[in-house]
Amino acid sequence: MITIKDVEHVAKLSRLALSQEEMEKFAPQLNSILEYVNELNEVDTTGVTPMAHSIKISNVMREDEVKQDFTREEMLKNAPEEEDGFFKVPKIN
C-alpha cells in the first residue's frame, strides 16, 4: 500500500515539489494503479506470444534500389558556383 510518505519519497527522488494536498490526492491514485497491475498479473498468459504492438504492423517502405535519378550536370546547373564537377562552397576557418 502506497502511503503519503511513499509519495513524498518518490516526489523527492523525481525532484517534484508537491503540496500536502497533492500528495494526499496521489496516494490513492497510485494504490489504484498498483491494484490494477496486480489484477493483470493474475491473468493466465500461458501460450500467448509476446508482442510489441497490439495490431500487426508491416513495413510499408519501398525496397532500397540504387538508381541514378539526376546526372551530375543536372545537379550542378543550379549551384551558385562549381569547380571540377563539385559544388564550390566558402572555406571554413
Image (spheres, grey):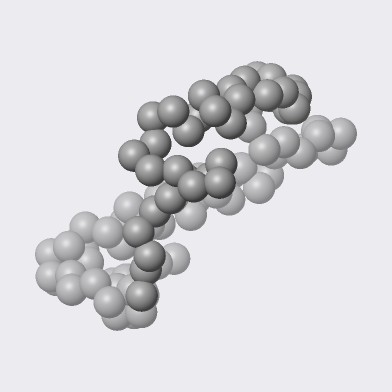
The number of callouts visible is 0
The image quarter in which residue 23 lies: bottom left
Query: What residue is shown at x 81% (from left), y 34% (from top)?
Result: 49
Q: In this image, 80 relative to 44: left or right?
A: left
- Is 30 on the left-hand or right-hand side of 15? right
The answer to whether residue 17 is left or right of residue 52 is left
User: Is residue 90 at all visible to an observer of this figure?
Assistant: yes
Q: Is residue 55 visible?
A: no
Quadrant in the picture for residue 39 = top right
Which residue is depicted at the point 27% across and 59% down? 26
Q: Residue at x 39, y 53 (%)?
A: 89
From the viewer's perspective, tell me whether residue 91 is left or right of residue 61. left
Q: Quadrant of residue 81?
A: top left
Q: Residue furthest right?
A: 47
Q: Residue furthest front?
A: 84
Query: x%, y% of residue 70?
Result: 59, 23
